[in-house]
Amino acid sequence: GYKWKNPVSGEEYDRPGVEYFLAKNGLKYFFIDTALLLGGKSQGVYAARFPLLAELWKQFESQYEEISTSFEKSQYEPYLIATAPSTGAPVGFFTRDDKTGIVVWSGEHGYPGCAEYLDFHKKHYPGGMKYWKVTSPKLDLGKKMLYWPEDVPRKLDENANHYVNLVK
């Protein structure tokens, strides 16, 4: 939670944090970006798409004050958060790791962009069947090559070994 100041009257009061509402509705944990735990900028994309959201973000940034902690934080540890003991059970949170997240989710920088894998976007019409491989993440759909399932096991092993070494 946090102290909130009414912009019109100037009245201040304690406002519950998101963890209060999560606990109240039975959610026991959630995930955050690394930047929320360790500082820095989140890699969100919505502010670039919605001007009003960008304006709200500027307002937030101008009022943001970092809260110092007496302990070292790590994105590899789970945490419990509660506004106050009176707000109920704490809620846990896990931090997404940027290094592993990008290889799992990014078509441009990660495994989904591997040439051998089945392309998610190109579909045959009619019927919607998928016959093409990624070929290249930025390649025009009309230039995609045919998918060969026999090429995938070697790439899966390669990606799995890479991921294991990445998280060690």
Image (spheres, rainbow, N blue to C red):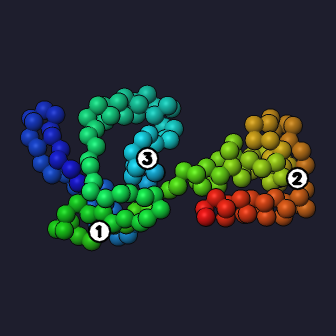
What amino acid type is highlighted by mark number 2? Answer: Tyr
Residue 161, given in percent of the width and then of the height, sits at 73, 63
Residue 33 showing in the rendered view: yes
Residue 109 appears at what percent x and percent y? Answer: 68, 44
The residue that mark 1 highlights is 90
Q: Could you tell me which quadrant the C terminus lies in? A: bottom right
- Of 121 and 113, nearer the camera is 113
Judge the density around disc 2: few (<14), some (14-19), many (≥20) Cα neighbours within 10 Å: some
Residue at the image position 40 percent from the left and 63 percent from the top: 93
Secondary structure found at label 1: loop
Check the picture and name the quadrant holding the N terminus: bottom left
Disc 3: CA contacts within 10 A as few (<14), some (14-19) or many (>=20): some
Q: Nearer the viewer, mark 2 or mark 3?
A: 3
Residue linked to disc 3? 35
Q: Where is residue 45 in the image (x, y as percent from the top left)?
A: 51, 38
Residue 147 tag number: 2
Q: Which amino acid does label 1 sit on?
A: Pro
Residue located 80% across and 35% down the image: 140
Callout 3, which amino acid?
Ala
Q: Nearer the viewer, residue 123 or 146?
A: 146
Q: Is tag 2's residue or tag 1's residue first in the polypeptide sequence?
A: 1
Residue 119 in the image: state x and y as whole percent.
78, 49
Secondary structure under tag 3 reads: helix
Q: Residue at image x 26%, y 49%?
A: 68
User: Which is more foreground, mark 2 or mark 1?
Assistant: 1
Q: Look at 85% across and 62% down and name the residue there.
A: 154
Q: How crowded is mark 1: few (under 14 residues within 10 Å), some or many (20 or more)?
A: some
Instruction: Give the answer, above or below, for where 116 lies relative to 167.
Output: above
Q: Distance between the residues labelled 1 and 3?
A: 21 Å
N-term mark: 2 or 3: 3
